[in-house]
Amino acid sequence: MSSTALLFVIAAAVAHASWNLLAKRAAHVGPTFVFAYGLCCTILYAPWVLWVLVFEQNEWSWPIVGCIALSGTVHLVYSLCLQRGYQLADLSVVYPIARGTGPLLATVGALLLLDEPATIRGISGMLCVVAGVLLIATQGQLRRLLQPEAMVGVRWGALIGALIAAYTLVDAYGVKTLLIAPVVYDWATCATRTLLLLPHTARQPRQAWAAMKGYWPLAWTIGVLSPMGYILVLYALRDGAPVSLVAPAREMSMLLVTLAGLYLLREPVGWGRLVGCGGIAVGVVLLASS
């Protein structure tokens, strides 16, 4: 992975970790807050998208339109499955399985479908990152994922992980092969999700406005950070970084969130999370040197 691509991925991980920490403060607001920061994102990035459409994205074709439509559809299905998975199973099971299987399946898909070369360091780094994510998310209690009551969450987590891998591969094809501008790609996806949430918010506008009282500064901040976290990943892919390296390296955000929880939120961090942080750190070093 080039130094430029690695810097993009690191910056993306920082942005991703930052907006997730901020979103935690407004978790109780629910879908209204998701709509709010999606709306902020759509507004804030519109000038950049317009500039790119006028001066950069001059060539359009049906494959480009189809790829954007497919990406938006997969992202939407991912969001719906994520919400449904959290309704039917424990977050502590769904989340680690999804974040672990996502980069794993994306790497396998990149090797098989995009003909990316496999290296021992790259595969080892990916496995270290996946193991680290699982250890952090389960606090070292990996055995609980095998218990019968956890299997519903395992199945939903695996499905969500497959969707993460799917949109990662589709988006990589879009920016690497079709040369679609990353900011246009991400903006179209965000605008689609926000539009689909509009009926839910518009059903009770006064209650939605009241629920957002005092949270608009957070929504505007996340509206900047959330898209940036993925746009930088897409730029890393367009710069030539392989999906098989970028997909697992993105999970560096798990390490950052854990450390922030330890030092900023004073959350308890057991041996499982510490070992998981070490696993991600080793994995990222191996991926960077691949």
Image (spheres, grey):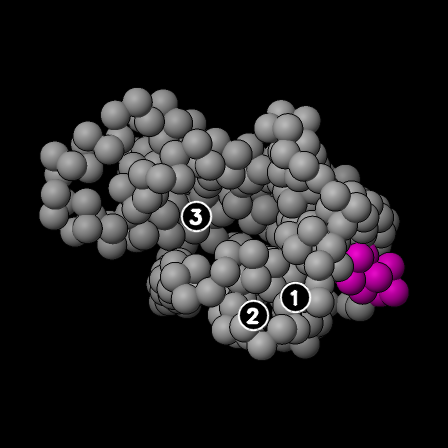
The rendered magenta stretch, by its main secondary structure, is classed as helix
The answer to whether residue 283 is seen in the rendering is yes
Percent across and percent down for residue 247 are 65, 56
Please give the label number shown on residue 31: none
The image position of residue 86, as x and y in percent, is 43, 60
In the figure, is residue 218 to the left or right of 173?
A: left
Q: Which residue is mark 3?
A: 186
* 121 part of magenta stretch: yes
How crowded pointer 3 is (Cα within 10 Å; few <14, some 14-19, many 20+) is rated as many
Is the residue under label 1 in contact with that under label 2 (CB below 8 Å)?
A: yes
Identify the disc placed on residue 150.
2
Q: Nearer the viewer, residue 267 or 83?
A: 267
Give the mark nearest the N terminus, 1 or 3.
1
Which x, y percent locates residue 214?
Answer: 30, 22
Do the residues bearing badges 3 and 2 touch, measured as CB atoms within 8 Å? no
- Judged from the image, the secondary structure of the residue bearing numbered disc 3 is helix
Q: Residue at x 19, y 45 (%)?
A: 201
Q: Secondary structure at mark 2?
A: helix
Q: Amino acid at mark 3?
A: Asp
Tell me the magenta residue range. 119-130
Toward the viewer: 92 or 116?
Answer: 92
Q: Which residue is mark 1?
A: 144
Residue at mark 2 to residue at mark 1: CA–CA distance: 7 Å
Q: Nearer the viewer, residue 232 or 87?
A: 87
Rendered location of residue 142, percent (x, y): 71, 63
